[in-house]
Image (cartoon, coloured by chain):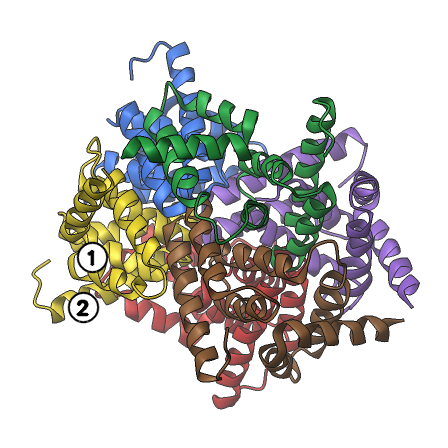
Chain colours: A blue, B yellow, C red, D purple, E brown, F green
Amino acid sequence: MESDRYKRGWEKLMEIDGHAGKNVMESLKDIAPDLARYVIEFPFGDVYSRGVLTLKEREIATVAALAALGNARPQLMVHIHGALNVGCTRQEIVEIMIQMAVYAGFPAALNGVFAAKEVFTERDNMGQSN
Amino acid sequence: MESDRYKRGWEKLMEIDGHAGKNVMESLKDIAPDLARYVIEFPFGDVYSRGVLTLKEREIATVAALAALGNARPQLMVHIHGALNVGCTRQEIVEIMIQMAVYAGFPAALNGVFAAKEVFTERDNMGQSN
Amino acid sequence: MESDRYKRGWEKLMEIDGHAGKNVMESLKDIAPDLARYVIEFPFGDVYSRGVLTLKEREIATVAALAALGNARPQLMVHIHGALNVGCTRQEIVEIMIQMAVYAGFPAALNGVFAAKEVFTERDNMGQSN
Amino acid sequence: MESDRYKRGWEKLMEIDGHAGKNVMESLKDIAPDLARYVIEFPFGDVYSRGVLTLKEREIATVAALAALGNARPQLMVHIHGALNVGCTRQEIVEIMIQMAVYAGFPAALNGVFAAKEVFTERDNMGQSN
Amino acid sequence: MESDRYKRGWEKLMEIDGHAGKNVMESLKDIAPDLARYVIEFPFGDVYSRGVLTLKEREIATVAALAALGNARPQLMVHIHGALNVGCTRQEIVEIMIQMAVYAGFPAALNGVFAAKEVFTERDNMGQSN
Amino acid sequence: MESDRYKRGWEKLMEIDGHAGKNVMESLKDIAPDLARYVIEFPFGDVYSRGVLTLKEREIATVAALAALGNARPQLMVHIHGALNVGCTRQEIVEIMIQMAVYAGFPAALNGVFAAKEVFTERDNMGQSN
């Protein structure tokens, strides 16, 4: 049933993105509630729940892709949080950005590092240890 | 010394890309030998040799980014080979593409899967088991 | 139930993409059957079935976006077919590409026109009138 | 004559973008007056005046393309205004963004919706009914 | 008058792209004659005729941008020809691609070099000295 | 030796980017010192020091590419400064953006001009004559 996908997706969203994910859903509520539902059902209910790759590996792929594309900074920041929430270290996040210097150029890597720096500061301010 | 970076890079290139990497270097020899040298020294001599991320994690990041960008099919194919050479399974490669449907759209995912299919056929024809 | 989304999606896919859509699904069967299922369920079962925009308007948006991105030629061709199948004229397809010259540059427009030319020839060869 | 293209373009720009279009032209006056002239002559004097597609269809194509590219937020906002000015409803704008989730990924769709939200608020504040 | 822009544009197109430019115009004749006219009037009649930058500098900018975008190979090849026609050396073309490794990544640089290699071979076959 | 590349790169960075380059390096110090080192060694120590193209030609290529990509505004601004530092005039910078209207679309050109406007104001405020 649809509601299983939604329920499974919501739990996965909370596991990965926690607070940040909730905020994005809130901000969609009045303007595009169906898009909010799709975000929960398809990416989180269907895709993140598949296994095969670990959640850490999925977030490495996602952070790399968003840093390389360079046109979705809010989502890059949400997924740097997500990657740290599911087991990446801060050093590994920086390392993904260095890897992107090779495949998407130094500007992509630098902007990725600056996004990471902002996320790390947010987490320091929230008292999170990683 | 420069030659240490080159030597370390060449060994890393052989470890990851083997035959495919050698072919790319060959094809640059007459037209852009310095670019061939830079490819060995910087991506492979400097970046891939850093540790922090495993080679498998680096290739997950790279395959994801190249599939998301969608404008570098030859390099995507080289790095699908590379990912399989350093420990990814074929199923994991397909899974990276499914993850990219969420972040770069279904065309990126489909073209990534079709590139993977071509690589898998090449490897079957070469008698490789994964 | 899931199967409703799949059934609705399959019918919508046949309505829009017909033969071409079926071929794409076939080619995914052995390598990524779950991605094939997602394509039917999410884009076609969920999104294309929403109403609000007409199918013609959805295809105008899609052809414009794929021409602007310029990195997904097979999907651009499928959706030029799709646009013609749901009511666009050939002249309107060309006009979308001219519009893209303004927003994505002349190379995007030219490559869009050349893709359209190939689609028109395919349809002439299949005896289709538009 | 050149001046016909300019006159026709200026009227078309006012019809579609009104206030917002005028502001962009103003901001180009001192630094790149020729680019301001080209914007009026080519996109508006030549392309938007062609017919074949309705102005609403042209703006659907443009909003879709700019949301998919994801790297031109000011122009996306101007064209969401434009689309609403020539007959799109707010719901249709949101729907274009949902369509883009399929072809350019969820980050493109989300950032498109957030840009639309900002435009809708601007229009509410200006007392515009759609 | 319009016809001045067209005449000036056609001469500029012939000066820069020669044979290759003529072929592109030919291939647009039956499907999108107005787009062919715009290509001549706006890029070549208006922009390339402006001065300020030399034609060589304009082609350096164009080859760099098309190599960085990586999604318009036919136009990249036309403009590598164009750059060579207005005074760039082959070594300078390769050098632009190396510069792009820094700003758009190594895949962009490699694909740029391979496009250049193909152009150089075409020119060798046509007996051109540079 | 490594330190030769670093030394040569640092001098080249100071020649081209001066104050702005130093700030970027500073901001990387605590979070990604190795990336800072790579920026100095590879782009500046290896690439910018090659000759073949003049520094002005390299910056024309870089400003064009970054304006076309449209996803790296901080680096675009640094390189507009850089281009002016190595001999471009302000009028030439604007001209590169007009050239990009043709190859990457009017939004890329407009955003490039607005970035240039901001850089020119910064330089006016610093009392720089070009």
Query: How many numbered discs?
Result: 2
Residue B92 on image: x %, y %: 20, 49
Name the residue at 30% across, 46% down.
B62
Q: Secondary structure at mark 1?
A: helix
- Mark 1, Cα crowd under 10 Å, few <14 / some 14-19 / many 20+, is many
> Residue E81's x, y, as percent?
54, 71
Q: Disc 2 on helix, strand or loop?
A: helix
Quadrant where the N terminus of chain B is found in the figure = top left
Measured as percent of width and height from the top left, residue A73 is found at 48, 34
Front-most of E111 and A94?
Answer: E111
Q: Are marks 2 and 1 in contact (CB under 8 Å)?
A: yes
Does residue E129 lie above or below B20 as drawn? below
Q: Quadrant of residue B75?
A: bottom left
Residue at mark 2 to residue at mark 1: CA–CA distance: 9 Å
Query: Is D115 situated left or right of C14 in this image?
Result: right
Q: Residues within 10 Å of mark 2 (few under 14, many from 20)?
A: few
The residue to which callout 2 is attached is B122
Which is nearer the N-term, disc 2 or disc 1? 1
Confirm whether residue D126 shows in the render: yes
Location of residue D25 (image quadrant): top right
Q: Is residue A126 above or below residue C81?
A: above
Chain ID of residue with mark 1 = B
Amino acid on which disc 1 is placed: His
Q: What chain does mark 2 sit on? A: B
* Residue drawn at 43 percent across, 38 percent down: F44
Residue B81 numbered tag: 1
Does residue D60 appear in this view? no
For the point 76% across and 35% down, the residue is D123
